[in-house]
């Protein structure tokens, strides 16, 4: 070999060495990026799990109990393959029961020896399933190609983004109360107190009718109209707003507008009585 050929071979080997180092550096950088992406995705999944736990506790859903581990051989579980007896090496032949090895019977592949029990054809097919390719019967199918980690990470990232979007929607729904969720807090409070006052007004009409037939005297009727039923309506609206007007997830206590509720309830009930008196006089 001449000096020029030796120099060319040395340059070729040097170029291959540099290419190998560059490939190794690129592969190391790719692995670092994949590990960083996996760590970041794991942090996102942990944060999502914690947020889902908070949402579940807010709406009163407890975490499901862990499933008890079933015994080996139970449904959906196969028994572990028994290991070799103690003291036997990895290539020890099975014994005959009297402390001696089976000799030729312990070597697989020997003809007409009792090394392994022969199974019928049907049981053998059940015990040893074979993947059959569509090209021909009895030919093992080709293994599926290994998944690309970058592609799998991208799919996981998209699923995490979708989970974040659904989580934000769940949080928005959790910030709405069950009672009149699309209404503003002020409008909801006015509607609740007015509804309770209207219910108390119906009770006023019943008391007026009872007073007309002599079941309720005038002092009792006046006490219920001026104080009793308005207070019942006010506390009823207060409790309804606290039970069904409170969002599942809210920072602090939502306003219940107590002065407004007091004013509404103590005006609606006497106004209902006055309306009844005007109606009776008009009919006369």
Image: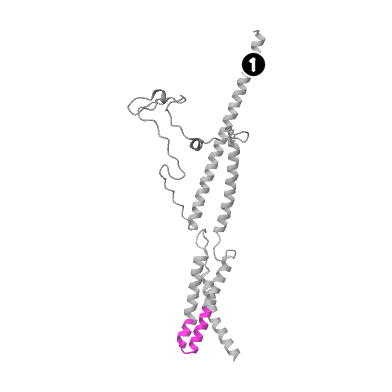
Residue extending farthest top? 2
Rendering coords of residue 236 (x, y %) = 49, 72
Identify residue for label 1: 11
Q: What is the secondary structure assignment of the residue under circle 1?
A: helix
Q: Is residue 214 left or right of residue 1?
A: left
Residue extending farthest bottom? 284
Which portion, as a residue range, is magenta?
200-224
Depth check: 210 or 94 in front? 94
Colour mapping? one colour
Rendering coords of residue 176 (x, y %) = 56, 61
Quarter occupied by the N terminus: top right
Q: Quadrant of residue 185?
A: bottom right
Q: Is residue 218 magenta?
A: yes
Depth check: 116 or 187 in front? 116
Rendering coords of residue 139 (x, y %) = 58, 32
Q: Residue at x 55, y 69 (%)?
A: 189
Q: Quadrant of residue 151?
A: top right
Quarter occupied by the C terminus: bottom right
Q: Pointer 1: residues within 10 angstroms few (<14), some, or many (20+)?
A: few
User: For the stretch drawn in magenta, what is the main secondary structure?
Assistant: helix
Q: Is residue 257 magenta?
A: no
Rendering coords of residue 178 (x, y %) = 54, 64
Q: Quadrant of residue 272?
A: bottom right
Q: Is residue 128 left or right of residue 139?
A: left
């Amino acid at each position: 070999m001449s000096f020029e050929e030796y120099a060319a071979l040395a340059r070729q080997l040097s170029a291959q060495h540099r290419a190998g180092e560059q490939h190794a550096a690129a592969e190391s950088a790719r692995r670092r990026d994949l590990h960083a992406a996996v760590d970041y995705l794991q942090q996102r999944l942990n944060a999502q799990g914690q947020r889902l736990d908070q949402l579940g506790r807010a709406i009163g859903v407890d975490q499901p109990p862990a499933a008890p581990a079933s015994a080996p051989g139970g449904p959906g579980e196969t028994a572990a393959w028994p290991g070799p007896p103690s003291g036997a090496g990895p290539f020890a032949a099975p014994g005959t029961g009297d402390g001696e090895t089976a000799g030729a019977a312990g070597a697989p592949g020997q003809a007409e020896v009792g090394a392994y029990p022969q199974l019928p054809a049907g049981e053998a097919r059940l015990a040893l399933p074979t993947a059959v390719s569509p090209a021909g019967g009895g030919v093992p199918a080709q293994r599926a190609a290994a998944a690309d980690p970058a592609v799998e990470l991208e799919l996981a990232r998209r699923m995490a983004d979708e989970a974040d979007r659904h989580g934000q929607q769940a949080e928005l729904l959790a910030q709405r109360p069950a009672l009149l969720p699309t209404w503003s807090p002020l409008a909801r409070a006015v509607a609740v107190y007015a509804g309770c006052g209207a219910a108390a007004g119906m009770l006023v009409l019943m008391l007026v009718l009872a007073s007309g037939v002599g079941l309720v005297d005038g002092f009792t009727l006046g006490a219920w109209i001026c104080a009793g039923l308005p207070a019942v309506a006010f506390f009823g609206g207060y409790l309804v707003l606290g039970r069904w007007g409170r969002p599942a997830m809210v920072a602090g206590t939502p306003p219940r507008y107590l002065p407004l509720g007091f004013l509404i309830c103590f005006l609606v009930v006497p106004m209902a009585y006055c309306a009844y008196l005007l109606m009776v006089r008009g009919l006369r």
